[in-house]
Image: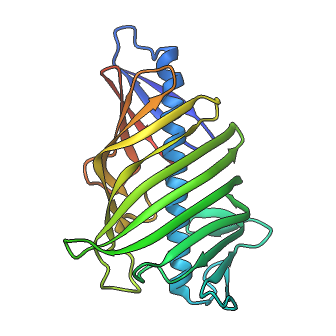
Amino acid sequence: MKKVFLAFSALTVLLYSCKDEDVISNNDLASTQATQDHLFAEQTFNDVGRIVEEGFLSSGINKSCASYQLINTDTANADTLIINFGTTNCLHNAKLRKGKLIITYTGKYRDSLAVMTTTFDNYYVNNNLVQGEKIVANQGRNNKGNMWFTIEVNNASIATNNGTINWNATRTREWVSGSATYYDISDDQYKITGSANGTGVNNNSFSMEITDTLNIDLGCLPSCVIKSGEATIIPNGYADRIINYGDSLCDCNFDVTINGNTYPIVVN
């Protein structure tokens, strides 16, 4: 079995070809780009959520290189939290960051019916410029007694050395474990459903649908937090691609199935 290595600034992908000719076709390579770009965008905006919640838990106390500014002057009861990483790269949660996250909120993450809108001001992660808007709305508790949220990522873009990823997503997040331990996120677990769409660095469009609920475990940090589940990527002009997020391990090793052939992908 021959190993084929593809290196990207955003991701490193390891593809193992099991075809008779022992190579990956051009069609497979092109459609794998959509999978890589979706996974990178997904990981980037999952990270945004973590940074925002960390900011609320810090209550304005400096942590690592970030500083936190609370602005409570809006008479409409919408306040603002600014998370500022400065104008030069600093290392925070194992990634280089600079710029600002600006969160306007009507309540904190755990408050029923709270809405938190995050935008970006020259915000870079590992020298990739992140733009767009993320809206998280706390919908209270479902019939299982679990807190749940709707999440929208609108007009997002990530500018990398290889090109720009454009991404939009709509998701539902159910908090199934850890909500009782306010200052400890390591026991937090979620279930995620939803869809996304965008264009990759090669300017080819794609859509995504979660076909088997994603299981999120923040105890996996700083590794990838999606431990299991499946999603289908549909790149324009190519057949569907199925992402298998793993077997409940805290790693960044996923599989993508293309035309019946399965290739491991490692997200860095």
Residue 122, compared with residue 42, is above or below; it is below
Residue 38, compared with residue 47, is above or below; it is above
Return the residue found at the far left: 144
Return the residue found at the far front: 76
- Is residue 126 visible in the rendered image? The answer is no
Out of 240 and 129, give the one closest to the viewer. 240
Residue 15, compared with residue 212, is above or below; it is above
Residue 153, compared with residue 163, is above or below; it is below
- Is residue 247 visible in the rendered image? The answer is yes
Q: Locate the N terminus and report the quarter of the image it occupies.
A: top left
Number of dots carrying numbers: 0
Question: Residue 202 at x, y = what percent?
Answer: 64, 29
Return the residue found at the far right: 87
Left or right: residue 108 versus residue 217 is right
The answer to which image quadrant residue 172 occupies is bottom left
Return the residue found at the far top: 21
Q: What residue do we see at 79% from left, 67% from top?
A: 88
Question: Residue 245 at x, y = what percent?
Answer: 34, 45
Q: What residue do we see at 46% from left, 20% from top?
A: 238
The answer to which image quadrant residue 10 occupies is top right
Out of 265 and 79, give the one closest to the viewer. 79
Q: What residue do we see at 51% from left, 38% from top?
A: 36
Question: Residue 181 at x, y = what percent?
Answer: 33, 85
